[in-house]
Image (cartoon, helix red, strand yellow):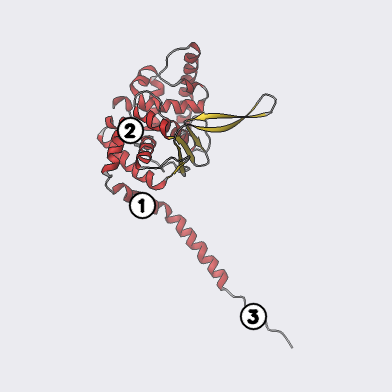
Amino acid sequence: MVASLSAPNPLPLLLLVALALAWIVWLWTQPRRLAHRRRRLQSAPFPEAWERILRRRVPLTRSMPADLQAQLKRHIQVFLAEKAFIGCEGQAITDEVRITVAAQACLLLLNRPTDYYPRLRQILVYPRAFWVQHTQPDEHGLVHAHDELRAGESWDEGQVILAWDETRDSARIPDDAFNVVLHEFAHQLDAENGLSNGAPELGSAQRHARWAEVMRAAFAQLQAQVARGEETVLDPYGASEPVEFFAVATEAFFERGQDLLQNQPALYAELAGFYKVDPAAW
């Protein structure tokens, strides 16, 4: 007696093919769906309550040209829809917290093509400065751990961490070149090209070369000024390393634009070329 062989069932294979095609279609249409969603968010009226918080908590925005203010509000609406805020150690996440942070983060996106900090998933907010543990190897290769008190941190793994009291107070004074949110979100821009080194994504090799030349000279100038004990437009913390220099320069660019332009015109021009705005004229 010869056993009969049954034909293989084609349904599992067809199902896999259908799922693969659906996944390909989803990936192909995702950018268009995301763009449509963002346009819809931007077309919604900016809530009056948010407007009051913006004007009260982020006075830097009051002097901006009207078109930039309108653009900033559209960016805020997208940012708040896409980024999660998490309160830590009892910190409440209110509209006041969210608008204050989002407005300053979105200042760095004006007039530029943006994907709204694509690597950033969430913003953690503490009531006050927080302790973080850092490790550092010595000259013998031994790793030492130590705690540091921080007002903010930017992580490549998709997080920005902020102290609310420092965030609120640094936003309240718009012309002291000290701003926690601008500093930490400059680090986010720096890391978008996959490497935090004080040079964000600039496009061409020519622009990268010019950026490196200007930044090296300005960094060396700041280090020399700090060593001599001179007063500087830039926060002396920027002299610690190039990564911090870019974040500190960003703070000064937006908060002391006229002073930076007068004291370091080449640095100001390079930052204006990247950020596509002219705060010295605000």
Tell me the element at label 2: loop
Q: Position of residue 2 (x, y in %)?
A: 73, 86
Q: Residue furthest bottom?
A: 1
Q: Amino acid at mark 1?
A: Arg
Foreground pick, 161 / 274: 161
Residue 102: image tag = none
Q: Report the quarter where the N terminus lies.
A: bottom right
Mark 1 vs mark 2, foreground winner is 2
Residue at (49%, 62%) from the top-left corner?
21
Q: Position of residue 26 (x, y in %)?
A: 45, 58
Q: Which residue is mark 3?
A: 6
Q: Is residue 95 visible?
A: yes
Q: Amino acid at mark 2?
A: Val
Q: Is residue 17 depicted above or below 227 in this figure?
A: below
Q: Residue furthest front?
A: 90
Q: Which residue is mark 1?
A: 37
Q: Position of residue 276 (x, y in %)?
A: 35, 32
Q: Is residue 113 left or right of residue 237?
A: left
Q: Report the quarter where the C terminus lies.
A: top left
Task: Determine which quarter of the picture holds residue 127.
Answer: top left
Q: Which residue is mark 2?
A: 58
Task: Determine which quarter of the picture holds residue 251.
Answer: top left
